[in-house]
Image (tube, rainbow, N blue to C red):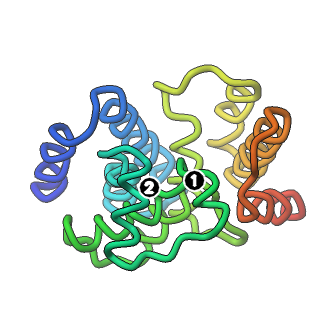
Amino acid sequence: MTEELEQIRKRLSKLLKKERYEHTLGVMYTAASLAMCYGADMQKALTAGLLHDCGKFCPAKEQIEMCRTIGIKLTESELQMPALVHAKLGACLAQYDYGIRDQEILDAITYHTTGRPDMTLLEKIIYIADYIEPNRKEIPGLQEIRGIVFRDIDQAVCLSAGSTVRYLENGGKAVDPMTVKTYNFYKKEV
C-alpha cells in the first residue's frame, strides 16, 4: 500500500464506524483481487475501494444537508432513498478532502451503489466488490455471484443488479431508475 493510501486508511479508521471501516477494507482488498484477475490498474482499484464509502461518516440526513451546502444535485430517487446519497457525496469528498483527481476513480465511487449502463472495468470492479466482499451478510444469490465474478464480471454485475431490483421490489421499496437501467443493459450484454 502506498504512503498516500496508508494516510487515507488511517483517516478513515477514525471517521467511520468499526463495521463500516471493516467493510471498506473488505471492498478494497476484493477490488484489488478483481483488478489482478482482469488486468485493471491495482492502485486505482485499491484507492476507489478504500474511498467508496467515505461519504458514510455521518447519518443520511447530514449527508443530504452536506450535498445541498456544497451544491451536489440529488435526484428525486436519491432523496427518497437516502442510502444512495453517500456515493455522490463520497466522490466529492474523495476529490476535495482526499485529493483524488483521477476521474475514473471518482466515477467508480459515484456509481458503486446503482451502477450504470456500460460501466468502465474499474466501475464494475468497485460495484461488484461492494456487493461480494467477505464481510457481507449472506443474501440470496450472493454465493452464486461470488462463484461467477472471477470468470465473468459482466454476468456478476447483471446478477447483482437483478438481485437488488428484486429485493427492493419484493420489499415494497423504491428502486433507483439507474439500477434498473444497469440491470437491463447487462442483461442484454450477457
Q: Which residue is mark 2?
A: 86
Q: Is residue 138 left or right of residue 2?
A: right
Task: Look at label 1 and name its amino acid.
Answer: Thr
Q: Is residue 156 left or right of residue 30?
A: right
Quarter of the image holding residue 51? bottom left
| 63 in relation to 96, above or below | above
Q: Which residue is mark 1?
A: 113
Quarter of the image holding residue 44? bottom left
Determine which of the numbered discs, if any, sits on residue 31 in the image.
none
Q: Position of residue 135 (x, y in %)?
A: 46, 25
**What residue is at 14 percent from the left and 47 percent from the top?**
11
Task: Look at label 2 and name its amino acid.
Answer: His
Q: Position of residue 52 (x, y in %)?
A: 40, 53
Of labels 2 and 1, earlier in sequence is: 2
Q: Is residue 94 left or right of residue 105?
A: left
Whether residues under marks 2 and 1 lie with C-beta atoms below 8 angstroms apart, the answer is: yes
Q: Position of residue 5 (x, y in %)?
A: 19, 54
Looking at this view, name the residue that lies furthest to the right: 188
Front residue (pair 61, 187): 61
**What residue is at 26 percent from the left and 71 percent from the top?**
100
Front residue (pair 97, 135): 97
**What residue is at 33 percent from the left and 64 percent from the top?**
66
Looking at this view, name the residue that lies furthest to the top: 138
Quarter of the image holding residue 104? bottom left
Mark toward the viewer: 2 or 1: 2
